[in-house]
Amino acid sequence: MSTTTFSKKARGLDVIEPVVTPSAAANETSFLKKPKLGASKTRKKEIPEGLWTKCPKCSTMIYDKELADNQRVCPHCGHHFPISARERINALVETCSFEEMDAQMTSVDALKFTGVAPYTEKLDQYQRSTGLKDAVLTGVGRIDSHRLGLGVMDFSFLGGSMGSVVGEKLTRLIETTTDRGLPLVIISTSGGARMYEGMFSLMQMVKTCAALAYHARSKLPYLSVLTHPTTAGVMASFASVGDLIIAEPGAMVGFAGPRVIRDTTQADLPPGFQTAEFLQDHGLIDAIVPRKELRERLSGYLDFLGEGRRKQTAAA
Ligand SMILES: [Zn+2]
């Protein structure tokens, strides 16, 4: 700040830069040279925090409102930013058609777990910062003419980790859709099982899959949508057993991380390893659907699967 007396911030943004020779106190060469990008502290301060977001893929600065209006997809390069569960539900279902289930369910600290911080403290902290009770929202809603069960995970709550609440809420959702004869859509994003709940977290893998087996036995469609990142215990259970497995572009999908696999197998990993595109080429993922097309595509898939089910019932 010592080199300039014409700070926009100090004088107000409406002040036009004066075209005068800088005082002798100013660095003589500074106004002749093109300033280096990112070198000016003053410029950084002019951008109010929380208004603009830099795209990690194309480095464009995006106005936050523009990003929100675009379902948090970069309008320049199509990079998919993380999106909260509530924003996603708002974008997907018909207005006011979503009835949330088990909204108040919260975890108990059965193991009295204390790591860097006690589990109860962590829960409290994330509940306050996200406004969520846990890492998934579940309920029944409508996309076009399709009533369906919808579960949406939120990575901002403890990395979308699956503890007993995530497992129980999803299981109740799956059982409700089975009872009511509804199709099911689960949108996943998760770092895996929640270590704070130890074995209780791992038990959710089999519980959700068992409920899904009953759903499948009723010949009801289940569409699994994988978003960045979907890994570990979630990918190894309900996320990978959809009748159709859909992913968002560029999503990281896998079980163990690439470093662990490289160290274990001592092999070089192929380019694009664990991306949605790589897994589509290798047959795990059926379709890659950009976020803005998801609603229309889900509706189309449900039309198709519903039609198949009607024919099957008629033939039986
Ligand atoms: Zn971009």
Image: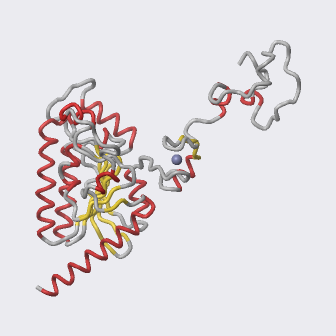
Q: Where is the C terminus found, in terms of image quarters?
A: bottom left
* Image side of residue 218 versus residue 149, left or right: left
Nearer to the camera, 284 or 230: 284
- Asked if one can make out residue 291 in the rendered structure from this viewpoint, the answer is yes
- The mark total stands at 0
Outermost residue toward the top in this view: 25
> In the picture, residue 301 is in which quadrant?
bottom left
Give me the residue at 73% from left, 15% from top.
Answer: 2
Q: Position of residue 216 (x, y in %)?
A: 15, 67
Give me the residue at 30% from left, 72% from top.
Answer: 302
- Asked if one can make out residue 139 in the rendered structure from this viewpoint, the answer is no
Q: Position of residue 117 (x, y in %)?
A: 27, 25
Nearer to the camera, 175 or 305: 305
Nearer to the camera, 247 or 43: 247
Q: Position of residue 175 (x, y in %)?
A: 16, 62
Give me the residue at 75% from left, 36% from top.
Answer: 13
> In the picture, residue 308 is in which quadrant?
bottom left
* Image side of residue 235 versus residue 78, left or right: left
Q: Position of residue 279 (x, y in %)?
A: 29, 53
Give me the residue at 31% from left, 40% from top.
Answer: 159
